[in-house]
Amino acid sequence: MATARAHTNIALVKYWGKRDQKLILPETDSLSLTLDEFYTTTTVEFDEQLTADQVTINDRLLDKKNSQKVRNFLDLVRQRSGESAYARVTSHNHVPTAAGLASSASAFAALAGAASAAAGMSLDRRDLSRLARRGSGSATRSIYGGLVEWRKGDDDLTSYANPIMEDVSFNIEMLAILIDTKKKKVSSRYGMRQSVATSPYYKVWPEIVAHDMVAIKQAILAHDIDAIGQIAETNALRMHALTLSADPGFTYFNSDTLRAMNAVRTLRESGINCYFTIDAGPNVKVIYDQRNRQPIYDALTKQFGKERLVVSKPGSGIKIWN
Ligand code: 2P0
């Protein structure tokens, strides 16, 4: 039996598209910030008495269909470790599930940590990152804290995350505006596949990401939060352009998403520097120097209400107990 806790991460340079669906090898590198406020704690126990895997998330037992991805992941761990028993998986998500707040990132990172330890494998963080990748691409990065890059690599062995700055030594902060915490309609998996297959703009995406990766790493080294925010905002808009330009086109934005984007732009016009990023859901995350927090928080409270705002500092990497 083992327990692991992993924090979620928000990409500043996005992963959007796979070149191998089964191994989850991405088309490009990506770079993220691990967040302190959103995390998943998961316990895995292999038990000879069980006749099937049993998966409980936030005190709700999942049926066969909803536990499919977790059971597939456990099969992979069994295959690699030689463990033959079914498992009891108990997970608590301190993240609104499936609303673009990257619940699958923390969930599969925690599951990789807990399941591999419970099965007696003793993986280093690189191998843990590779294993988490098989559950969900973004989980690759949630093994580490702070600023993390995922190098696309060439194959299963070489596609894993690296920490860029685990203890973030400058004042970057992220505020999530929880616009809609219901389960999203278009899964990232499907959305990516549609974008790669049908957006005529997809062919320039790898060049955009290659450029943004170089620029954002320079900005990180310089502790330049404005440059980081600008790169992240432009990168996010270009990622979402791939959904709008797919055939049929689709979007993760709703009217409140646009309202939040405009609120950030208005703050900026008034001289308060802040930037937005958006994932595969309607929620908006705002990036800024924590010294600017108060006016940003006040303005967004007026428009969205305090109960919809969550401020988060950079978070730590995975912890495993067994
Ligand atoms: C990211 N997203 O880099 C990008 C940006 C959402 C937008 O990774 O199919 O749940 O399991 O690999 O990781 C969300 O997709 O997708 C995601 P799979 P995942 O964070």
Image (cartoon, rainbow, N blue to C red):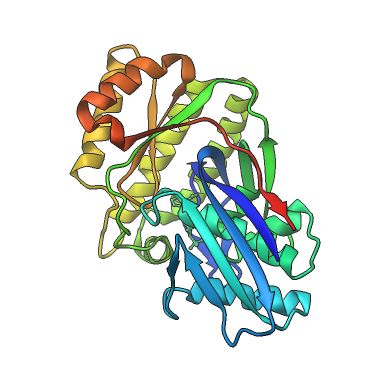
Q: Nearer the viewer, residue 93 or 25?
A: 93
**Residue 159 in sight:** no
Locate residue 106, reporting x and y percent.
54, 52
Q: Can you say whether 186 is above or below 177 in the image?
A: below
Extreme residue in the top direction: 271
Give percent across and percent down for residue 96: 39, 50
- Image quadrant where residue 123 sits: bottom right
Residue placed furthest toward the left: 255
Q: Is 75 drawn above or below residue 287 in the view shown?
A: below
Q: What is the quadrant of residue 122 in the picture? A: bottom right
Identify which residue is drawn at 26% across, 58% down. Answer: 250
Q: Residue 148, image x and y in percent? A: 62, 41
Location of the C terminus by quadrant is: bottom right
* Quadrant assignment, res 97: bottom left
Number of dots carrying numbers? 0
Does residue 267 appear to the left or right of 216 in the view shown? Answer: left
* Residue 309 in sight here: yes
Compared across the picture, whether 18 is left or right of 305 comes to right
Q: Is residue 184 left or right of residue 114?
A: left
* Location of residue 211 in the rendering, given as x and y in whole percent from the top left corner: 54, 38
Q: Residue at x 30, y 26 (%)?
A: 264
- Is 186 situated left or right of 254 in this image? right
The vertical placement of 101 against 211, above or below, is: below
Residue at 68%, 35% in the rendered image? 166
Identify whether 307 is placed above or below 137. Answer: above
- Nearest the viewer among 39 and 104 is 39
Determine the residue positioned at 56% across, 31% down.
Answer: 215
Quadrant (top left, top right, bottom left, bottom right) of the N terminus: bottom right
Report the front residue among 110 and 228: 110
